Image (cartoon, grey):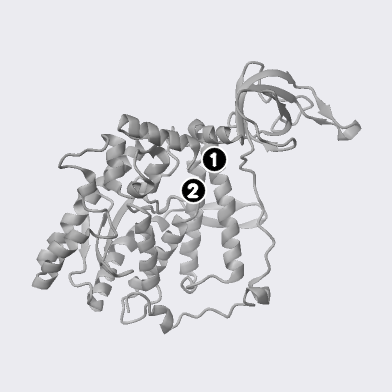
């Protein structure tokens, strides 16, 4: 937790209401998101109990496993779930655009992509388990069940990708934009977090902490006093109505959370990250259409290293984009010395380096700042005010920072108008940059060294893969 967020939490406790820690929205919100609230059977890892889902806040769809210990009923529930989710997901594949790429063949990308919203990170984890327990199934299970399992696995894995908005957990997204006066564990309760953001915590009968949890776990008191007797009665209607009472409050809270986030203007970097999501979604659709096997239970060494490298690059880019989009996020880096803001005291727009044909224009800028600057000379810098510009730290000390501009000045012998900050202008520079980073040099899978298990065997799903939590 950053110092600024800690301060916001203390202020929230003092004032009795959550404090904003962002000025813009850092996630994409689809025009027609799919809200998905799953429930699982207590004591089981991936035994579905019920789900409430839909794209219309006034018309939720309730799917119930009236006897969760019956495997046939579970697979019937999975097929029913596939009948709702697959048409939603596949509907985005009808409209595509051709994307040209430098030094690569063009490809077709979906114009839009599905967005599945779940209440909390535990919901994402349960979706991952559902996908794992469904994607390897074979007949007599309907074909839609393993297909849905592949898509659920994909969405759950994409949820871990920094900056992705294909399957956001609403408590996490709210927590990126507001700081409550409660613990991080309590923030995982959607009702409690929303209460802090909207009205502040309450001790009356409407205290959100007594609301049913928004999945995937159910309330132990409900399990013992309501659900167990309903199942023992053998009445499907009684079980269905009992589960409806658990899911409807969470359904209303999810749409309240959507409205809160929609009230914030999207940050400048949100659109580009959604483009990446659309490209990833299109790639997964092509992978399935080509008849490729389902995702393996475990990645090989090379595939795992490549995935980790992609996620590290995505995390660095996401951190930089959030800071550039939002002065409150940038303030956290100013406190740690990774960024500084101040007033331009002096400039030398005609400064050059080198001789003859190797001479390069390198304007100098002197900034007065009260921020701590913990950056070494030579550090590459970027600025939110001129995102295409690059700079390098020359020196820093006694409240004065000297930097030279290295790119983004135009192609002439003099800097383009506006490329060099004016004296008296307020500027901000940071070591966070969103520059392109190439992929690391990794061996082919066939060349995996023996220290990492050697070349992986060709993956062919078998019956053992299907013996998951639903066995």
Q: In the rendered view, would you say 299 is above or below 174?
A: below
| Residue 463, percent from left and from top | 41, 83
Q: Quadrant of the C terminus?
A: bottom left
Q: Nearer the viewer, residue 13 or 93?
A: 13
Marks 1 and 2, Cα distance to the nearest angstrom?
A: 10 Å
Asked whether, in this view, residue 359 is left or right of residue 442, the answer is right
Q: Nearer the viewer, residue 267 or 199?
A: 199
Crowd tier of the residue under label 1, counting other residues whose Cα lies within 10 Å: few below 14, some 14–19, many 20 or above: many
The residue at the far bottom in this view is 463
Instruction: State the residue at coordinates (56%, 61%).
Output: 307
Instruction: State the residue at coordinates (56%, 80%).
Output: 458
The residue at the far right in this view is 356
| Residue 359, percent from left and from top | 85, 32
Q: Nearer the viewer, residue 281 or 406?
A: 406
Instruction: Locate residue 320: give its quadrant.
Output: top right
Q: In the rendered view, would you say 306 is above or below 10?
A: below
Instruction: Locate residue 50: give its quadrant.
Output: bottom left
Disc 1 is placed on an element classified as helix
Crowd tier of the residue under label 2, counting other residues whose Cα lies within 10 Å: few below 14, some 14–19, many 20 or above: many
Disc 2 is placed on an element classified as loop
Res. 91 visible in picture: no
Instruction: State the residue at coordinates (44%, 37%).
Output: 6
Asked whether, in this view, residue 70 is left or right of residue 406, the answer is left
Asked whether, in this view, residue 97 is left or right of residue 75, the answer is right
Instruction: Locate residue 452: give its quadrant.
Output: bottom right
Res. 306 visible in picture: yes
The label shown at residue 163 is 2
Asked whether, in this view, residue 11 is left or right of residue 59, the answer is right
Q: Are marks 1 and 2 in contact (CB under 8 Å)?
A: yes
| Label 1 or label 2, whichever comes before in sequence order | 2
The residue beneath circle 1 is: 321
């Amino acid at each position: 937790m950053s110092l600024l967020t800690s301060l916001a939490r203390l202020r929230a406790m003092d004032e009795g209401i959550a404090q904003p820690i962002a000025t813009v929205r850092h996630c994409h919100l689809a025009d027609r998101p799919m809200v998905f609230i799953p429930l699982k059977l207590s004591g089981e890892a991936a035994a579905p109990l019920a789900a409430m889902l839909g794209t219309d806040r006034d018309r939720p769809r309730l799917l119930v496993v009236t006897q969760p210990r019956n495997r046939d009923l579970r697979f019937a529930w999975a097929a029913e779930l596939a009948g709702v989710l697959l048409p939603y997901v596949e509907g985005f594949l009808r409209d595509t655009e051709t994307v040209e790429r430098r030094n690569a063949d063009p490809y077709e990308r979906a114009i839009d992509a599905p967005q599945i919203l779940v209440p909390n990170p535990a919901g994402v984890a349960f979706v991952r388990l559902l996908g794992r327990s469904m994607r390897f199934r074979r007949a007599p299970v309907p074909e839609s069940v393993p297909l849905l399992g592949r898509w659920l696995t994909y969405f759950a894995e994409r949820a871990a990708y920094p900056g992705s908005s294909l399957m956001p957990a609403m408590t996490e997204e709210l927590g990126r934009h507001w700081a409550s006066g409660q613990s991080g564990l309590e923030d995982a309760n959607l009702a409690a977090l929303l209460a802090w953001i909207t009205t502040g915590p309450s001790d009356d009968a409407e205290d959100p902490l007594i609301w049913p949890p928004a999945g995937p776990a159910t309330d132990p008191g409900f399990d013992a006093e309501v659900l167990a007797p309903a199942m023992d009665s053998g009445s499907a209607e009684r079980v269905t109505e009992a589960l409806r009472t658990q899911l409807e409050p969470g359904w209303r809270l999810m749409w309240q959370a959507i409205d809160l986030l929609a009230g914030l203007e999207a940050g400048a970097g949100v659109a580009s990250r959604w483009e990446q999501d659309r490209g990833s979604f299109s790639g997964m659709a092509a992978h399935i259409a080509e008849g490729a096997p389902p995702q393996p239970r475990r990645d090989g060494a090379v595939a795992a290293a490549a995935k980790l490298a992609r996620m590290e690059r995505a995390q660095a880019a996401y951190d930089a984009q959030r800071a550039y989009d939002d002065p409150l996020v940038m303030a956290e880096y100013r406190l740690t010395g990774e960024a500084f803001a101040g007033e331009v005291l002096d400039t030398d727009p005609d400064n050059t380096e080198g001789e003859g044909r190797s001479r390069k224009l390198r304007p100098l800028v002197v900034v007065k700042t009260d921020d701590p600057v913990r950056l070494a000379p030579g550090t590459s810098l970027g600025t939110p005010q001129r995102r295409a510009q690059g700079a390098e730290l020359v020196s820093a000390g006694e409240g004065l920072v000297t930097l030279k501009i290295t790119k983004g000045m135009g192609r002439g012998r003099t800097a383009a108008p506006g490329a060099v900050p004016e004296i008296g202008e307020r500027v901000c520079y940071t070591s966070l940059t969103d520059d392109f980073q190439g992929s690391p040099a990794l061996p082919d899978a066939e060349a995996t060294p023996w220290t990492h298990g050697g070349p992986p065997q060709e993956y062919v799903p078998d019956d053992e893969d299907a013996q998951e939590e639903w066995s």
